[in-house]
Amino acid sequence: MKKLTTALAVLALAVVGCTAPADDGIDDDGKTPGATPLNHDQDVTCTTTDDCGDGEVCEDGVCQMARCLDNYESQPPMGINRYFGTDGELTVISDNTWVDAFEGSNGQYINSWDLSGAGGKVVDVAGGNLTGLRPHSVAVAVEFSDVVHINGPGGITQLNIGIWPQALAAGDVDADGIDELVAFATDG
């Protein structure tokens, strides 16, 4: 009896589950495809946001998905939570151009770095094991620049990333023991 009940249940599910629902059509309003908002025109060029669909904005003459409207604000890792890990570093920015680095475990001074010649104010700082060597490196984003300045055991290097970063973050996202550096611009 149990086998018969199971067989009937499977048969009923197969019949009901495989039956196509009535195709009432999303665009079943008498209009041809392309005439409704659900079938956007293939031309995505625009001059204003009014030329774009819902949830889109006109950026650089192209309709694009609307992104976050507010700029990302990086919060300093102070207070009850510290996100530098168990043996990370702490940096302090003074006068918008000087970066002072300290060991996170004991507060020992690592170095001081003058970025007044970098062309702008320091926007954000991230530290971590970017090279695999001690002391850890400090990466700095400077306003109006697509270059991230990195001060590490091998000296100061510059990394052109192609965007004006507004926020930096470092962390070992692939578990290889070396931190990766992530940069965010105002538009994502």
Image (cartoon, rainbow, N blue to C red):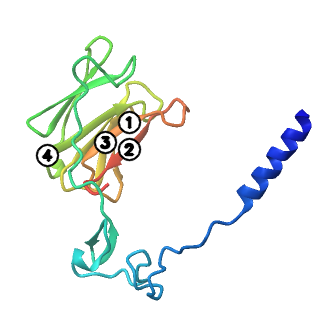
What residue lies at 19% left-to-right and 56% top-to-bottom? 144
Residue that mark 2 sits on: 182
* Residue furthest to the front: 1
* Structural distance between the alpha carbons of marks 2 and 3: 6 Å
> Residue 187 or 157: which is nearer the viewer?
187
Q: Quadrant location of residue 127?
A: top left
Considering only order in the chain, which callout, 1 or 4, is on the residue closer to the N terminus?
4
Considering only order in the chain, which callout, 2 or 4, is on the residue closer to the N terminus?
4
Q: Amino acid at mark 3?
A: Leu
> Residue 106 or 47: which is nearer the viewer?
47
The answer to whether mark 1 and mark 3 are in CB contact below 8 A is yes
The answer to whether mark 2 and mark 3 are in CB contact below 8 A is yes
Q: Nearer the viewer, mark 3 or mark 4?
A: 3
Considering only order in the chain, which callout, 1 or 2, is on the residue closer to the N terminus?
1
Please tell me the numbered disc located at residue 170: 1
* Structural distance between the alpha carbons of marks 1 and 3: 7 Å
- Return the x and y of residue 29 as percentages of the image width and height: 44, 82
Left or right of 133: which side holds 186?
left
* Residue furthest to the top: 106
Q: Amino acid at mark 4?
A: Lys
**Circle 3 SS class:** strand
Residue that mark 4 sits on: 121
Residue that mark 3 sits on: 168
* Structural distance between the alpha carbons of marks 2 and 1: 6 Å
Q: Amino acid at mark 1?
A: Ala
**Circle 1 SS class:** strand
* Structural distance between the alpha carbons of marks 4 and 2: 19 Å
- Which quadrant would the C terminus be assigned to in this image? bottom left
- Return the x and y of residue 137 as percentages of the image width and height: 36, 32
Q: Amino acid at mark 2?
A: Val
Considering only order in the chain, which callout, 3 or 2, is on the residue closer to the N terminus?
3
Q: Quadrant location of residue 131?
A: top left
